Amino acid sequence: MEQNIDFDKIDWALPPPEEEPERQYYFIGKCRRLVEEFEKKTGRAPTACIQTFGCQMNFRDSEKLSGILEQIGYQETDDERADFVLYNTCTVRENANKRVYGRLGYLNTLKKKNPDMIIALCGCMMQEKEVVERIKKSYRFVDIIFGTHNIFRLAELLCQRLEEKKMVVDVWEGTDRIVEELPVERKYPFKSGVNIMFGCNNFCSYCIVPYVRGRERSRRPEDILSEIRRLVADGVVEVMLLGQNVNSYGKNLENPITFAQLLSQVSQIDGLERIRFMTSHPKDLSDELIQAMARLSKVCHHLHLPVQSGSTRILKEMNRRYTKEQYLGLVEKIRKAIPDISLTTDIIVGFPGETEEDFLETMDIVEKVRYDSAFTFIYSKRTGTPAAQMADQVPEDVVKDRFDRLLKRIQEISAEVCGRDVHTVQKVLAEEPDDHLEGYLTGRMDNNTLVHFPGDVSLLGKIVDVYLEESKGFYYMGRMTASGS
Ligand code: 5AD
Ligand code: SF4
């Protein structure tokens, strides 16, 4: 998206504006002047590298961070030997944290070679007090720390760091504000994530997200619609509406609306071809939404519906607020209304107190639903969540054995299910040149399955008709048919 900011109009003699986003434009302008000085001194533009860990939300946040850095004048690179390195972190499982600490050691060696390098950390991990304390104590070379609620302040924090030359820490415990109209730099020109809400109120007992992302806040529908209209004008044909629990969208707005109503309004935007969304909580998935998905032709027939466990007893301990039977009933209702729906899920293995019988209930639900694919996770103890206090943490070897059994069965089923459209013609959005095959493109069907087919890069971003010649389990090999548009 191209923002037209007139930096010449900013009066530097005045203090920064109080209002957002004007305040941030002021600081972007100020940083630009510092970047110009850098360019004069070195004869090149400074480089910036953003590394993103975690979920779609973080990837979208990184596009916003990238937009700000681009406006400041940084040249983006994948190489961590950059002048500015930013890690947008995840803390949903402990492994993600460990990776960040590991990589920080490497960044320290880079900084020794380039002492002017700036290292910044943001995202979910930074919302944890112990993490910030540890970094302040043992990773003094980090320059800027901020959290999930104030990413829009990047330019201001960078300015502060450049002027004061000491570590800047700005982490907010929570917020009720949503700052609109900041620059964004998209990874793909033709598809984009769009935040519709932030935070989560569900407090599943294992999950740290409600603590680090704060309470549920919905964006106003008019702001969402105008963002999507701008995206479409800029070449976007597919949007992914993002929220931790999109099914409870709009409940707390001044003029409440439902997620199904929002979908219907988004559908009316001319030029937009596909609408996806993520993530749905089974307890809030309404009949109205199922009907809307069946009725609205732009809404893709893919539903990510995290089950987490097949055992009603464990689901209760997880505070998921549905039973195995209710989940299966929901799946039946969805399949009846939308027979070609592709269902995917998240499953946690080894939740405290999970017995072999509980685990077999999970195997059973996988058998009954027959997911297109499933993300499986080993339970990870997160400090501060109720599950971390529970007795009977399951021994590692037992969890590993269950995890392997589950994964094997999921992959077998997935290979059977995903092949069901072979020898049909499907609409495919051409997304990338194929990594492995010269002259081929990789695209996605409406139901999110990948297809590889011969094609020219000029087709990227277009929806074309592809005949699916062969199923390879998780993807198809195909060829375009004459009616490709
Ligand atoms: N341990 C393992 N997996 C977890 N998830 C969330 N918290 C944990 C945890 N503590 C998984 C859930 C969720 C997905 C995004 O991450 O399955 O749906
Ligand atoms: Fe975590 Fe549950 Fe909220 Fe999902 S719905 S983010 S699993 S608390």
Image: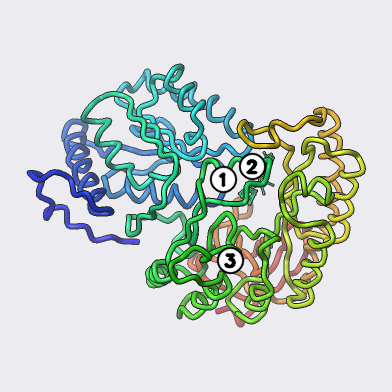
Q: Earlier in the sequence, mark 2 or mark 3?
A: 2
The image position of residue 54, as x and y in percent, is 57, 43
Real-space CA distance between mark 1 and mark 2, rounded to the nearest whole angstrom: 7 Å
Q: Amino acid at mark 3?
A: Arg
User: Considering the numbered disc 2 on the image, is that residue within a helix, a strand or a loop?
Assistant: loop
Q: Which residue is mark 3?
A: 276
Q: Which residue is mark 2?
A: 207
Residues marked 1 and 2 touching at CB (< 8 Å): yes
The image position of residue 225, as x and y in percent, is 43, 71
Q: Residues within 10 Å of mark 1 (few under 14, many from 20)?
A: some
Real-space CA distance between mark 2 and mark 3, rounded to the nearest whole angstrom: 24 Å
The CB of the residue at mark 1 lies under 8 Å from ligand 2: yes
Q: Which residue is mark 1?
A: 210
Question: In which quarter of the view is residue 407 placed?
Answer: top right
Viewer-side label of 3, 1 = 1
Residues marked 3 and 1 touching at CB (< 8 Å): no
Viewer-side label of 2, 3 = 2
Q: Amino acid at mark 2?
A: Cys
The CB of the residue at mark 2 lies under 8 Å from ligand 2: yes
Residue in the foreground of this view, choosing between 38 and 208: 208
Q: Residues within 10 Å of mark 3 (few under 14, many from 20)?
A: many
Real-space CA distance between mark 3 and mark 1, rounded to the nearest whole angstrom: 23 Å
The CB of the residue at mark 3 lies under 8 Å from ligand 1: no
The image position of residue 340, as x and y in percent, is 75, 73
Would residue 434 appear left or right of 104 to someone viewing this image? right
Q: Amino acid at mark 1?
A: Pro
- Seen at 29% across and 25% down, the residue is 116
Question: In which quarter of the view is residue 302 placed?
Answer: bottom right
